[in-house]
Amino acid sequence: MVLLLVSSNTFLAVLNSILVLLRLDTSRPDGYIVEYRANLGLSAFKSGGPGVFLGLIAFSLFVLVFHTILSMRVYPIRRHFSIAILSLGLLLLTLSLIVSNALLVLR
């Protein structure tokens, strides 16, 4: 179970990194939509550069490394807690993949 979760986390982190890198276009003069603030009315969409999405890649790699190391340290104490940590990392990487894909699809 632990190896399945670690390999799933690794796959999602690599998939997120590859999909973000393939969809980035540095020649866009207006940038990307990186956030939406509903309380701002007409200027609800905020734009940003590709650095925001490079931050998402760093975030997914950080989540992968941090959850794996934390799970390895907790495994000798409580096996089920270690599996829960890896499962939460899987959830976090899945949500990161969904959010980065949704932001990159917006034009």
Image (cartoon, helix red, strand yellow):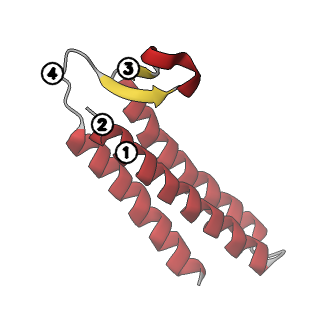
Question: From this viewpoint, is residue 42 visible?
Answer: yes
Residue position marked by numbered label 3 in the rendering: 47
Q: Residue at x 69, y 65 (%)?
A: 85
Residue 101: x %, y % from top left:
35, 47
Q: Residue at x 30, y 36 (%)?
A: 106
Q: Which mark is residue 106?
A: 2
Is 89 positioned to the left or the right of 8 in the image? right
Which of label 4 and label 1 is nearer to you?
Answer: 1
Residue position marked by numbered label 1 in the rendering: 102
Q: Earlier in the sequence, mark 3 or mark 4?
A: 4
Which of label 3 and label 4 is nearer to you?
Answer: 3
Give how far apart the Cα atoms at labels 2 and 4 are: 16 Å
Q: For the residue carrying disc 2, how many other residues have a C-alpha within 10 Å: few (<14), some (14-19), or many (20+)? A: few
Pick whichever, 66 or 53, lies toward us.
53
Q: Secondary structure at mark 1?
A: helix
Q: Earlier in the sequence, mark 2 or mark 4?
A: 4
User: What amino acid does circle 1 point to?
Assistant: Ala
Pick whichever, 42 or 71, lies toward us.
42
Residue 41: x %, y % from top left:
50, 18
